[in-house]
Amino acid sequence: MQFEGINLSADNLTKLVVEQLATGAYRGYNDLSPGDWLVRAWHALPSPTREQLAGAVNQALKHPSPPVRVEALRVLDMAPKMADPEVLLAIAESHFDLFRGLRRADDAVQVDRGRDFVQLTANVATGSSGSQFRHTMATDPVYGLHVLAALARLEPDWTVTHAADIVTSQLDADGTRLNILIFNFRQDWPRMQQLVHNLAQAPALHDRLRDAILNKIKDPQHQTALLAEIDRQ
């Protein structure tokens, strides 16, 4: 099987993927990074070569070279359907140091690609293992906020029920987590009401909760109703 004149046989695929992630040897006119070529190839190829290519990219997440790992993660961010949840969860459980604090040479010092890894894993992981990952990670002080959007989308009832544990004053001093939750439930009025009701039980959260509602809820009637829920507590 070939893509743009390059042989993608099973025998050389793993090596080719690693070399491409590391060097960007193959590149189309509009490709901005080494991974772009692999994403285009994945979309163009038939099975089983497509699955083999995705498998090689997933395995590259464990490569000894940090730049290769970063670029493999970027590929999976661009094409999440390529991601293998079992590989991601296994890395999260036993090899998270491969991504904790990771950044590319041209990344700013505050960049941490571990956040991207956590967010991707939260979005694609399924079943009880995926739920356990999201639930456990939600209270992580560094990476927890990066699973909140996935929790609100995939497990809204669990998120509403446990919201007070996720947005404690210690975990969410600046209200970032509150803003994420309010934003992600803004189209789900019954759960939004329950979310605000649950969070309003903690007076220490009231000021930040009001700010989040004013920032993320644009409908004046909904704003008024939610603020009144806080005032009732």
Image (spheres, grey):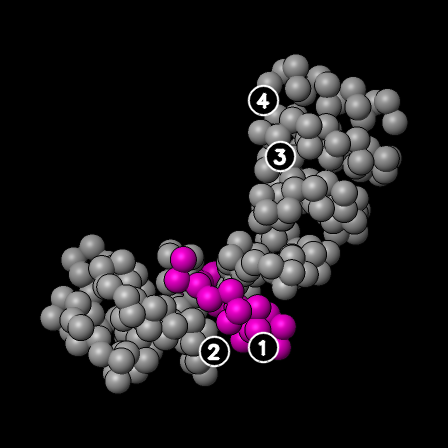
Name which of mark 1 and mark 2 comes first in the sequence.
2
Residue tagged 4? 218
Q: Tell me how far mark 3 sits from mark 4, CA to CA.
A: 13 Å
Query: Is residue 13 in sight in this rendering?
Result: yes
Quadrant of the drawing holding the N terminus: bottom left
In primary-sequence order, the first of circles 4 and 1 is: 1
Q: CA distance from mark 4 to mark 1?
A: 42 Å
Q: Are marks 1 and 2 in contact (CB under 8 Å)?
A: yes
From the viewer's perspective, tell me whether residue 58 is left or right of residue 130.
Answer: left
| Residue type at the position of mark 4 | Lys
Per the rendered image, the range of residues in magenta is 81-108
- Say which residue label 2 marks: 62
Q: Earlier along the polypeptide chain: callout 2 or callout 3?
A: 2
Q: Who's the residue at 76% across and 43% down the image?
A: 161
Label 1, secondary structure: give it: loop
Badge 2: few (under 14), some or many (20 or more) residues near its Cα, within 10 Å?
some
Q: Which mark, residue 185?
A: 3
Q: How many marks?
A: 4
